[in-house]
Image: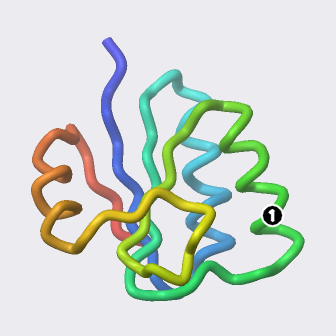
């Protein structure tokens, strides 16, 4: 049975996205939350975001400046986290 995993990140975004893509190889459901910061504009992040789209991963943020991600308030994110089997803060 697939596990549902949330990956939360603020500062080390490229590494967190790369790790989330690695976790999905185990056929688990992985969602990524970019918290309190704008998504960095590096080539690595762009490539990882594209791959996440191909893998049908969901990306959420509580920062309204991240217009290309699904926006949720911090409170909405907190409630959503209850539905995960594992939460990885990176």
Spot occupied by residue 64 in the image (x, y as percentages of width and height): 45, 79
| Residue holding disc 1 | 46
Q: Secondary structure at mark 1?
A: helix
Relative to 90, residue 60 above or below:
above
- Of all residues, the one furthest to the top in this rendering is 1
Q: Position of residue 61 (x, y in %)?
A: 42, 68
Vertically, is 3 above or below 69? above
Identify the image quadrant of residue 1. top left
Q: Camera-side residue: 51 or 75?
A: 75
**Relative to 16, 78 lies left or right:** left
| Quarter where residue 4 is shown | top left
Residue in the image at 39% along x and 86% along y = 36
Residue found at x 44% / y 27%: 28
Q: Decide: few, some or many residues near mark 1? Use Cα within 10 Å; few <14, some 14-19, many ≥20.
A: some
Q: Position of residue 57 (x, y in %)?
A: 55, 39
Give the camera-side residue of 12 and 64: 64
Q: Residue at x 75, y 55 (%)?
A: 48
Left or right for 71, reference 46: left
């Amino acid at each position: 049975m697939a596990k549902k995993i949330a990956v939360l990140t603020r500062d080390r975004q490229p590494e967190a996205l790369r790790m989330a893509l690695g976790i999905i190889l185990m056929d688990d459901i992985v969602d990524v939350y970019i918290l309190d910061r704008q998504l960095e504009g590096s080539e690595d992040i762009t490539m990882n975001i594209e791959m996440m789209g191909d893998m049908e991963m969901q990306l959420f943020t509580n920062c309204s400046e991240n217009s290309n991600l699904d926006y949720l308030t911090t409170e909405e994110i907190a409630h959503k986290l209850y539905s995960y089997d594992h939460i990885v803060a990176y």
